[in-house]
Amino acid sequence: MVKRNLERAFVLGGIACLVLATPAFAQQGQVLTELENQVSAAAKGWETTIMDAARSLFWILAGIEVGIAAVWLAIQAASLDSWFAELVRRIMFIGFFAFVLTQGPTLARDVVNSLYQIGAGGGSASPAEVFDAGIRVASQMSEQAKFGVFEDNALAIAAVLAMGVVVICFSLVAAIFVAVMVEMYVGLLAGMIMLGLGGSSFTKDFAVRYLVYAFGVGMKLMALVMIAKIGSEVLLGLAQAPTAETDQFITTLAIAGISVVVFIIAMYVPNIIQGVVQGASVTGGMETIRHGGQTTSFALGTASLAAGAVGAGAAAAQSARAAGSSVAGATLRGMSAGIGSAGRAASSAVKEKAIGSPGAYAGSIMGLANAKLDQARTGHSSPTPPPERHNT
């Protein structure tokens, strides 16, 4: 009777958590949309001020440009034909960049919006929709989080951890999306002052760079939207695939790993594409990829540590169940054992890395933590690596 009441309490508690979490997730999406709208409205309020300053700068530089050309022709004692040709050339130059000054902001926004629609595939995309995609993937995985006597508790723990990883990764992707949107509004707004530098032949390149920057921001936004939409579609397809029913444990861990990969790609690849458009060096992109590889290694180490913690928790839960504990007690004991073992392994790895223990110099923190966790589970320590050599 007590066991049945505990199971009923757990079921009701899970339903209550889902009911309470759904409005919170919806509110999170509304906050992102409201933030985007507030930034857009605030940026439009500064457009008139910056454009007035850009026009003043443009005509000051245009007057200086005409004055320098007139002085140069007077020094050369040019003929009337030379004066007329130079006047026509200056009028065409100033007229073209005056058109760029007037229509440049509109042209830049049209370029960014066009690339944005290309990335969205003709549909809609926003930070809130990216966040909602992560919630949908986590909701699909929640069907595997079933605790009980005849259920796979290890799979349930793995599903809960994977759900957390997916939600966190897509939340970070949505945050990157918001940052790019803010960059688009603020960057295109502040860059309007560069259009005023088109009034002189000596500074006209800055006005051209503004249009190049607008194209680069559009490409960055397009890449980010494509990565977010493709990643969410792949994860949803993987969660709904037939293999999700047969190889549930592997599929759950794969979804968590792919969500980490999607976050890393969203963090680095759009910046590389923007750098290529703006003429950044290839070595800068390779340096970014190298840091991305380090981040990937850390993420994989974290995933491996989580998987080891799940195994330790499952073993502790089975032992507690065999000793006569209830389902709820065994589950809680397994979760506490898994989290505790992972925490102890990570803290021990950080300590050895900080004090420079023998054998810790060549490994990463996550690698040492996984080794500590394996040692605690199996009871066998790995061979001690040779000490670090100091060449004199």
Image (cartoon, rainbow, N blue to C red):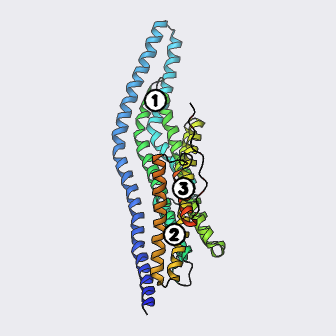
Q: In the rendering, which numbered label is found on residue 293?
A: none
Rounded to the nearest angstrom, the CA distance separating label 3 from label 2 is: 19 Å
Q: Tell me, yes or no, if residue 170 can be seen here.
A: yes
Looking at the image, residue 290 lies above or below residue 117? above
Residue 384 vertical position relative to residue 195 in the rendered view, above or below: below
Looking at marks 3 and 1 on the same chain, the residue that comes earlier in the sequence is marked by 1
**Which residue sits at x=40%, y=22%?**
63
Residue at mark 1: 198
Name the residue: 48% across, 83% down: 327
Q: Quadrant of the C terminus?
A: top right
Judging from the image, what secondary structure is the residue with disc 1 in?
helix
Residue 365 point in image, percent of width and height: 51, 52
Could you tell me if the residues under marks 2 and 1 are in contact, i.e. CB atoms within 8 Å?
no
Q: Quickly name the residue at label 3.
A: 299
Q: Is residue 255 above or below residue 100?
A: below
Residue holding disc 2: 138
Query: Relative to 260, is 37 on the left or the right?
Result: left
Of residues 21 and 332, the one drawn nearer to the viewer in this rendering:
332
Rounded to the nearest angstrom, the CA distance separating label 2 from label 1 is: 51 Å
**Of callouts 3 and 2, which one flags the residue occurring earlier in the amino acid sequence?**
2
Secondary structure category for the residue under label 2: helix
Q: For the residue carrying disc 3, how many other residues have a C-alpha within 10 Å: few (<14), some (14-19), or many (20+)?
A: some
Amino acid tagged 1: Gly
| Quadrant, the N terminus | bottom left
Residue at the (43%, 16%) spot, across then down: 68
